[in-house]
Amino acid sequence: MSLKPKKKSDIKKMEEKMKSKASKMDSMNILPPYTMIVSEGIKTEPLYINGLVKKVNDKYKNLTKEPHIAVYGTGRNTQGLIRFVDKKITNGEWSHYKKFWLMYDKDDFPLYNFDNTQFEAEARKSHEMSVAWSNESIELWFLLYFEDYHANNGRKQYIEKLNTYFEYSKTREDLFEILNEKGSLENAKKRARKMYQEFLDSGVTSMSAMVPATRVYELVEELERYLKN
C-alpha cells in the first residue's frame, strides 16, 4: 500500500504545531524558579516587595498555571524565619519552592541572632536561601531612594526623613509605586551596594556592625532580572 503525500496545508499545520511546542518549551526554560520571599514584617515589607513581585508574575502569567514567586509575612524575627521555613517545607506546604529569600531588620534583636541568621541561611544546601536584611530597618532602604545616608541614628530618624519626601506610612498599599514615583530605585541600588561594599572593604564581617546598611538591593536586582528575560 502506498502512502499518499501530505497536502501542503497539512504540512504547514504540522510545522506551526512544532513551532508552537518549541516556543512553549523555550518559555518554560526562562520561567523564574519557584521562589518564596519570607519577611519578618507582616505589612511593610510585603506591601513594598509585592509591588515588584506582581510585575514579574504578570509577565509570566500566560506561561504558567500559578505564580512562581510569592511573598509571606510571618511576624517572626531573624532565626525564627529559618525555623518557620523549615517547618513549612517539612509539612510539605513549601516543598516545591527552590529558592527562599529572608527579609528582616536588625532592630533591637541580639547581635548573634542577627549575624547567625545570614550565616545559617547561606550555608543551606537542600533549599537555597538568601538574605535581604536591613540594619537598622527597612526604612533605610526606602530612604536611599532619595539620598545618601550614613548616620547611625535608627528607625525613628529614617521615618522623619522619609516624611520630608512623601507622606510615609508602614501600611501604605502603594509603597513600591510611591517610592518609584518620588525617588529613584536605580540610585537606591547604587547607594546600598556602595554602603555594603565599603564595610566589606574595611574588613567588617559582622552584619550587626554594618550600620547603616541594607542588602535589600540584591533581592530587588534578582527580581528585575526576571523582567528582562
Image (spheres, rainbow, N blue to C red):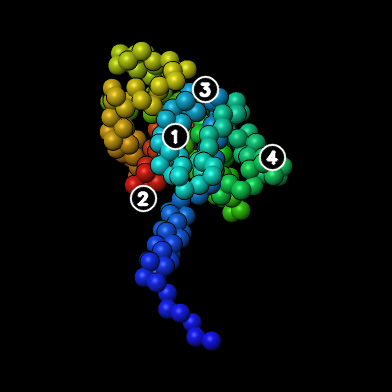
Which tag, 4 or 2, sits closer to the chain's start? 4
Residue 221: x %, y % from top left: 37, 42
Report, in whole angstroms, how far the alpha carbon at label 3 lies from the one at label 2.
30 Å
Q: Is residue 25 shown left or right of residue 96?
A: left
In front: mark 3 or mark 1?
1
Which tag, 3 or 1, sits closer to the chain's start? 3
Which tag, 3 or 4, sits closer to the chain's start? 3
Using the rendered view, name the quadrant where residue 40 is placed.
Answer: top right
Secondary structure under the numbered disc 4 in the rendered image: helix
Kindly identify which numbered label has been placed on residue 43.
Answer: 3
Q: Which residue is drawn at 30% across and 16% down?
A: 165
- Residue lying farthest right? 91
Q: Name the residue under label 1.
A: 54
Kind of residue at badge 2: Asn
Which tag, 3 or 2, sits closer to the chain's start? 3
In front: mark 3 or mark 2?
2
Q: Mark 4 points at which residue?
A: 87
Q: Mark 2 points at which residue?
A: 229
Secondary structure under the numbered disc 2 in the rendered image: loop
Which tag, 2 or 1, sits closer to the chain's start? 1
Report, in whole angstroms, how far the alpha carbon at label 1 lies from the one at label 4.
26 Å
